[in-house]
Image (cartoon, rainbow, N blue to C red):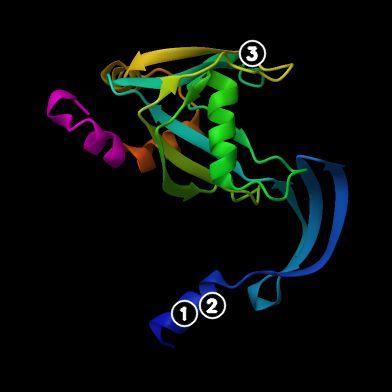
Amino acid sequence: MSDSDDLKRRVSAWEVLSSDELYSHPYFRFRKDRCALPNERIMPAYYVMEFVDWVNVVALTDDGKIVLVNQYRHAAKRRFYEFPGGTLEPENKNETPEIAAKRELQEETGYVASRLTYLGLHYPNPGLQDNRMHVYLGTGCRKESEPQLDTYEDLEVELVDVQDFFQCIEQGRPMHSLMMASLTLALPAIKKYYSVSSLAL
């Protein structure tokens, strides 16, 4: 078997024999699949949550600050530093990740970016979820309005020195794992933007 044939075999999708919807909501759907695996094995119940795609923005100001939201997350019962972001609007089929990123940045922080650059995507939890997180770098960010928060959002906007933010991570401050994955994509661009001779990143 060639390397390409072996790769194709390893990445081939499981055959879905049946699928039952367990719960449906505009922002997500919960289903149970019965699947045929390689070697004639049958997975009787594989649970999947279908979410709309998510976006976040690593937002930088020209004076060395990163625009963060300090947000309470009830499941963990603590607050986290997070990049501004959220979901694509499920009722707006024309909303692209870039449009959603601009919208979420301004809604959550009141800031807009002079330039928005797409950095890539990652999968938040592919063992359970099917959606993707799209990551953008916002540069030249400036405040243009007050935040327009959803009714039940509990967050505060903080401008944190980029170097101080990295020190928080190095000192072991608990972080949101999705933000850490996005930061991995953003780090080369952050270094380039600030010409890092002056930043200990």
Name the residue carrying label 1: 6
What number is the disc on residue 154? 3
Q: CA distance from mark 3 to mark 2?
A: 46 Å
Marks 2 and 1, Cα distance to the nearest angstrom?
Answer: 5 Å
Which residue is denoted by mark 2 in the rendering? Answer: 9
Q: Nearer the viewer, mark 3 or mark 2?
A: 3
Q: Main secondary structure of the magenta part?
A: helix
- Between 38 and 161, the one nearer to me in the picture: 161
Q: Residue drawn 58% across and 21% down? A: 108
| Residue 190 lies in quadrant | top left
Secondary structure type for disc 1: helix
The answer to the question of whether label 1 and label 3 lie on touching residues, with beta carbons closer than 8 A, is no
As shown in the figure, which amino acid type bears the numbered disc 2? Arg
Q: Nearer the viewer, residue 5 or 176?
A: 176
Q: Residue at x 39, y 81 (%)?
A: 3
Q: Residues within 10 Å of mark 2 (few under 14, many from 20)?
A: few
Q: Are marks 2 and 1 in contact (CB under 8 Å)?
A: yes
Residue at image position (40%, 25%) is 141
Image label count: 3
User: x%, y% of residue 91?
Assistant: 78, 43
Task: Give the Cα distance between marks 1 and 3.
Answer: 48 Å
Report whether 156 appears left or right of 18.
left
Residue 37's place in the image compared with 144, above or below, is below
Q: Could you say whether the residue bearing mark 3 is in a helix, strand or loop?
A: loop
Which amino acid lies under the numbered mark 3 shown in the image of this protein?
Asp
The C terminus: image quadrant: top left
Residue 132, placed above or below residue 80: below
Looking at the image, the residue that sits furthest to the bottom is 1
Sequence-wise, the earlier of marks 3 and 2 is 2
Q: What span is colored magenta in the figure?
A: 188-201
